[in-house]
Image (cartoon, rainbow, N blue to C red):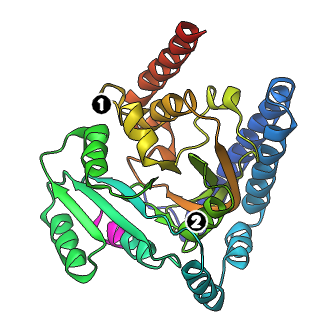
Amino acid sequence: MRLKPQWTQARRLISDRNSMIIRVLRLVKSTLMIAVQLPWTGISVFCPRMKSQAFELRDLLNPGFYAAWAAAQDPGAAHLREQSQEARELPRRPLFSIITPVFNPPPEVFDGLIRSIQKQSYPWWELCLANGSTDPAVSDLIVSWKAQDSRIRSVSMDNLGISGNSNEALKLAAGEFIVLVDHDDLVAPHLLFEAAAVLNQEPSLDLLYYDEDMINLADRRCRPFFKPSSFHAAWLRKANYLTHCVLRREMVLNAGGFDPALDGAQDWDLFFRCIEKTDRIAHIPKILYHWRMAPGSAALGLGEKPYAVQAQKRAISNHLGRLRSNS
C-alpha cells in the first residue's frame, strides 16, 4: 500500500521532530554531566565545555547558525596574505611535518585535505603521507599532487594499521614539529601560522593544541569543541581532548612513536607518554581543525571503531602504571 504524499510528508515531519527531541535530550544529559564533574574538572575545563554545549544547542535550534558564526571568525583572503608576509618576517620559521596515515579515503575527500594544506598562509611545511591504500585512485592522486608540490612526500606499503602507517609517515618527517592530521579531515588555512607565531613567543614549547569543530554529512561545519586555556592532565585521563595537535618531533621519537598494540587509541597513548616528560604545553584559542563525520570515523562515535574502547582503557592503565612506577 502506497502512502499519499501528504501522509509521507507528515511522517517525515514527525520523524524529524522526534530526532530533534532526542538530540536535545542527549545534549541536556551531557550538560548535566559537565555540571556534575565541575568539582574535579574545575572552572578552566567547565567553561569551554559549556561554551561548546551552548553553541551546539543554538545550532540545533537554528540549523546553520554555527557555520555562519564560524565563517565570520575565519581570516579572509586579505588577512591570509598579510599572514604570509608576516611569516617571512618571523625570527624563527620552524618546519612543520604534517603526519597523515592514508588508507582508502574517498579520493575527493582526500583531495580536499591536501588542498586545505596547500592553502596554508605559512609556507614552511611538508606533508608526509604513508599510503597503505588498496584503491589505485588514492595512489594516483598522491602521484599527481607530488608532481605539483615538492613539499609533499610519500611512502607506499601494505597497510600496517593506523599506528604502523603513522610511524612510516613519521620516518619521512624532517621538521622540528609534527602535526597530526587524518586523511579525511580539513585544516584551517592559518593553522601553521598560528602555531609558528606562538612558538616564536615561547620557543621551548613541546606541544600545542587548539580548538576544533566537525564537518557533518551535509558538508557543513558544526559541533565546535572549545578546549581549556591551560593544560589539564586529569581531564586528559578522562577524555582525549588534545586529539589533533602539534608536537615536537624529537619528543615523539624519544617517546617511541605510535604503538601498534594500541590502534584506536594510538594518539591518546602517545600524548600520555609525552606529558609524562614535559609540561611545556600551550593552547591556541582558535578553531584550527575540522574533523569530518565520515562513516568509519570516530567523529561519528565510538561505534564506528568498537575496538578503540579496549585500546583506550589499556592506554589509560599503562599511563597510570608508569606514573606509579616513577613515583
Q: Which residues are magenta?
A: 104-111
Question: Which callout, 1 or 2, points to the residue nearer the camera?
Answer: 2
Q: Secondary structure at mark 1?
A: helix
Q: Residue furthest bottom?
A: 78
Magenta segment, prevailing SS (helix, strand or loop): helix
Residue 206 pos. (x, y %): 56, 45
Residue 176 to residue 221: above or below: above
Residue 245 lies left or right of residue 82; in this view the side is left
Q: Quadrant of residue 214?
A: bottom right
Q: Are marks 1 and 2 in contact (CB under 8 Å)?
A: no
Tell me which numbered mark, 1 or 2, is placed earlier along the sequence: 2
Residue 247 pos. (x, y %): 50, 48
Residue shown at 31%/41% (left/top)? 162
Q: Which amino acid is tagged 1?
A: Pro
Q: Which amino acid is tagged 2?
A: Ala
Residue shown at 31%/48% (left/top)? 170
Tell me the quadrant of the picture where the C terminus can be found: top right
Residue 302 pos. (x, y %): 48, 36
Q: Quadrant of residue 220?
A: bottom right
Circle 2 packing at 10 Å, graded few (<14), some (14-19), many (20+), is: many
Residue 241 pos. (x, y %): 61, 41
Q: Secondary structure at mark 2?
A: helix
Identify residue for label 1: 260
Asked if residue 197 lies in the magenta stretch, the reply is no
Q: Which mark is residue 173?
A: none
Q: Which mark is residue 196?
A: 2
Query: Which is nearer the eye, 9 or 2?
Result: 9
Residue 270 to residue 218: above or below: above
Residue shown at 59%/81% (left/top)? 89
